[in-house]
Image (cartoon, helix red, strand yellow):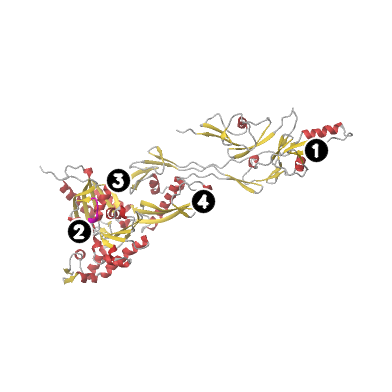
Amino acid sequence: METNKVTKMNTDELVFSLDIGTRTVIGLVGKYKDNNLEIVESDIIEHDERNMYDGQIHDIGGVTEIVRKIKDRLENKLGQKLDKVSIAAAGRALETYRVIVEKNIENMQEVNKRIIEGLEMEAIQKAQGAVENQSSDGGSQYYCVGYSVVNYLLDGNIIENLEGHRGRKVSADVLATFLPHTVVDSLYTVMSRVGLEVVNLTLEPIAAINVAIKKSLRLLNLALVDIGAGTSDIAITKDGTIIAYAMASVAGDEITEKIAKTFLLDYDIAEKLKISLNSKDEHKFYDVVGIEHNLTTEEVLDRINDAIEDLAREIGDKILKYNEKAPSVIFLIGGGSQIPRLTNYIANYLKMPEPRVVVRDTSIIENVKGIPEALNGPNAITPIGIAKTAIDSKYKDFLEVVINGQKVKLFNSKQIKVSNALILIGYNPRDLIPKRGEDFTYYVNSEKKVIKGDVGEPAKIYVNGSEANLEYRLLNGDNIKVIKSTSGEKPQAPRIYDCVKMVKRVLFNDHEVKLIESIKVNNELITEDRTINEHDKIEVKEIDILGELFKAQDLSITEYNVRVNGNEVEENYLLHHGDKIVTKKIKMENNASNENKEEIADKNSNSYNKENMDIKNNKDIPVKKTIELIINGSAKMIEYVKKDLIFVDLFNYIDFDLSKPKGIIILKVNGKKAEFAQKLKDGDNIEIYWEKPEI
């Protein structure tokens, strides 16, 4: 028994595509074999009523019946059911918008992927808002079906890749393309009514260019114009990629209407006359009042010439708008491309050589076999492109995911990422980037000092319960949860000694003395360490002259021989950090009383720094010393009475809980691993923190 040529094929191996046009609906069934699309069956039905206007469905019931007829007829030819279909949306519904967004970078931090992705998301959301606001009803929802970054900018200069750079401001110049959901919904409604599942939805200009201009030719500046009945869809290539999609709202119907009005014909007769202009030299027809007309093609064209010129001008203007100049070559496809004189008019309008504007038919399509004779003209390129695009796409064009409990449908024009889903729901991209807490500001000797706030936690993204990121590629049914980023804490109020920058110190008879004469906070003299308030004004008066140091110690320099670093000096000596000062009492006169001797000796041995602490050389009274350290980035002054301050002593002076481990403790001095018994010296840089172990 003879079987149908595809009866034994699995339904999943067949590709069923529909091109739902303004004048006709074309159905194709093909299969993928040896890297080729082989067309098995096809069918064409014209609309008996005007169910479509300008490429959009107006009568869902009328279009449903046409699609049902094509489906039934193809199923009868194949001997098996068709349950999946690939379709395309008209270019008339396509909206593109170009937008530039900027973002200031805090503290010249390094630009990372999260910043770049947030910048792109913000650009797409801004473009989407602009497109929706400009829509005729002001309330349509649009899906982003694709976008490209025209340029990145760093501090106003174009740069190829922002990642890893540092600057004050980053910008993205983005071209985004959108499709209104109403177009998608009407197409899906028709398919649902005839029992077809949409497995791939593309755009008509995308489908056409996929078969009409191979990728190797896209290095050239080319324009493809698909002139249908209702719209003229335009795709422009340059430098190896498609740089723009556009649409002219005039096409073949304008020519038909001109013929009908000029010769008083009903629409269907006018349409047949238009089609015959490309194949006959003479035409005989009757107008609505019964008058017979016998005209040559040139005579008819002369009477409708202004409409052809208008169509050429509209197409030319759209090309110039998006390409900014005439392209190298223009390819025309679609039924309307066959109107005589049109190619010449377009070439003349754009000041191009006439041979550079040409009509293409299916003979230029590669890797497609079995094209029937009825589909060998320029009107068949788009339906074949829909089928070819469906084969090249392995995934459904719409995914449904859940984001923070909200169901979202995504147009799958490329591999969909978490970032694409967040754009659709209008997620604020600034909620992805952690914010720094408020700064703490104070002043030291009129110089503004700022303690930076802590950096908050970045946003956390989970897909199906597992941690993910903005680049994570989504599948149908994925559940996404986004926990927005947090703001960091404001720094705790520091203490006075933490705010005072490191000042000069000297060794005075082997005792360390800090050269501070006085400290004032908001003009109030301070005698002890305490926390300050934000915007406090701290005034530090340092000791610069040797004589002033003696006065601060309540000593008379005239009673001593003074050597600094081994050299005898005068009282006006300018002190330097680290100076070693040694004093020797000048011998007393013989008539000096023993009481005076004891008093002067006591002054010499009990020298002290007035604003910091007493320095007493007495075995029974502990001698206080000071040391200033940088601990975890903050200056801290520590008083101690031991001979030396060692590392382990620090835990008596800082707030660090060793009883509750939070990982591996890291201890460093000046960038090197610390020892517990290591002696510390003034100015050492200390790091003490917990490090979380890697999982």
Residue bearing the label numbered 4:
168
Q: Which residue is mark 1?
A: 560
Residue type of the residue flagged with mark 4: Arg
- Disc 1 residue type (three-letter): Tyr
The answer to which of 403 and 323 lies nearer the viewer is 323
Relative to residue 411, is residue 228 depicted above or below? below
In the rendering, at what x and y percent does residue 303 appear?
24, 71
Left/right placement of residue 56 relative to residue 632 reads: left
Residue bounds of the magenta highlight: 363-367
Quarter of the image where one finds residue 291: bottom left
For the residue labelled by badge 2, is the local secondary structure a helix, a strand or a loop? loop
Q: Earlier in the sequence, mark 2 or mark 1?
A: 2
Q: Are marks 2 and 4 in contact (CB under 8 Å)?
A: no
Q: Which mark is residue 48?
A: 2
Q: Main secondary structure of the magenta part?
A: loop
Residue 560, quarter of the rendered image: top right
Magenta stretch holds residue 666: no
For the residue marked with disc 2, what is the amino acid?
Answer: Asp
| In front of the other: 326 or 301 | 326
**Mark 2 or mark 4, earlier in chain:** 2
Q: CA distance from mark 3 to mark 1?
A: 95 Å
Q: Residues within 10 Å of mark 4 (few under 14, many from 20)?
A: some
The residue nearer to you, when weighing 349 against 518, is: 349
Mark 3 and mark 4: Cα distance apart in space? 42 Å
Q: Is residue 309 above or below residue 191?
A: below
User: 677 or 374, which lies in front?
Assistant: 677
What residue would you read off at disc 3?
Answer: 396
- Nearest to viewer (mark 2 / mark 3): 3
Residue 177: x and y, percent? 36, 54
